[in-house]
Amino acid sequence: MQLIIPDWANIPRNIAAFSTTRSGGASLGPYGDGCGGGGLNLGTHVDDVPHTVASNRALLATVLPTEPVWMTQVHGRHVIDADGAKIGMEADAAIATRPGMVCVVQTADCLPALFADLEGRVVGAAHAGWRGLVGGILQNTVARMRQAGAGQIAAWLGPAIGPAQFEVGSDVLAAFVDAAQAAQYQPQVRAQIHACFRPISGLSGKYFANIYQLARIVLQQTGVTDVYGGDLCTVTDSMFYSYRRDHVTGRMASLIWLK
């Protein structure tokens, strides 16, 4: 397996985290590694061979303390507590306070965000596509972590669609503008959000959206200013699965836990 280790600073030693890539598994065809070899597809909902996905998850489990709390992600804003959650619950984020409980999100262009309490008491993981960002999934994750005893929180933004590839329509821009107004963000913050949408020349009503910068702005409004990552693009880098690029593809995982 080829893993991406978060490049965040000052994280307590009792916190472990990484994101997978598409290489090192047993999946074939569109779920392969892109180079003719086996791919580490971890998604059970993408029409890959079930026993192959099970094999990939078993391989992943060899570097984890326990089975991850796999969620059924619905592009929503619900956050679960992994300590007492059942696998398959509908949610798009999880937090954990008990050592060995692994928070996990699956992505293939959407933004995975991992969170660490700098006192080493709480961790979290969120799946943030644009709908989740608009709906408040990052804010809700931070809030749940603080309710569970977190102090200062750092975030790492994992592999996602890059700002030169994420083409969206005016409806997406309007959704973010409306959400910023509803949250009563200051005018300068609303301007920063608007600046995350770069008009595409020759295509009226089309924009390139910077999902990484949108996440940073949202997190800053929650008081999370230690934000790392955000420099990978799933579409342009073939080491990652990308739904936008390939349509039929696998899913990667981003995971975090307390040791």
Image (spheres, rainbow, N blue to C red):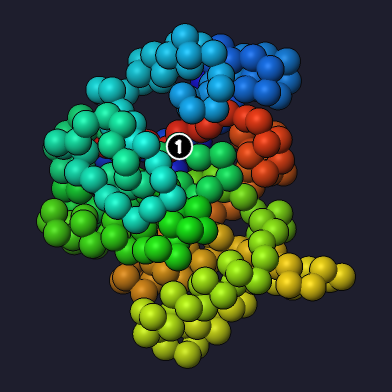
The structure residue drawn at horizontal position 28% and vertical position 44%, both measured from the top left corner, is 94
The one nearer the camera, 251 or 162, is 251
Q: Is residue 180 above or below residue 80?
A: below
- Count of numbered circles in the view: 1
Among the 4 quarters of the image, the one containing residue 90: top left
| Residue 207 showing in the rendered view | yes
Q: Is residue 151 above or below residue 28?
A: below
x, y (%) of residue 107? 50, 40
The one nearer the camera, 29 or 89, is 89
Going by the image, does 85 lie left or right of 234? left
Give the crowd class for mark 1: few <14, some 14-19, many >=20 residues within 10 Å: many
Among the 4 quarters of the image, the one containing residue 226: bottom left
Q: Is residue 57 above or below residue 161?
A: above
Going by the image, does 30 lie left or right of 89? right
Residue furthest to the bottom: 187
Going by the image, does 89 lie left or right of 56? left
Q: Secondary structure at mark 1?
A: strand
Amino acid type assigned to the residue bearing label 1 in the image: Gln
Q: Which residue is mark 1?
A: 106
The one nearer the camera, 172 or 122, is 172
| Residue 116 showing in the rendered view | no
The structure residue drawn at horizontal position 51% and vertical position 72%, both measured from the top left corner, is 176
x, y (%) of residue 189? 47, 82
The structure residue drawn at horizontal position 61% and vertical position 69%, both measured from the top left corner, is 171
Give the position of the C terminus as an image quadrant: top left
x, y (%) of residue 181? 43, 83
The structure residue drawn at horizontal position 16% and vertical position 48%, both measured from the top left corner, is 121
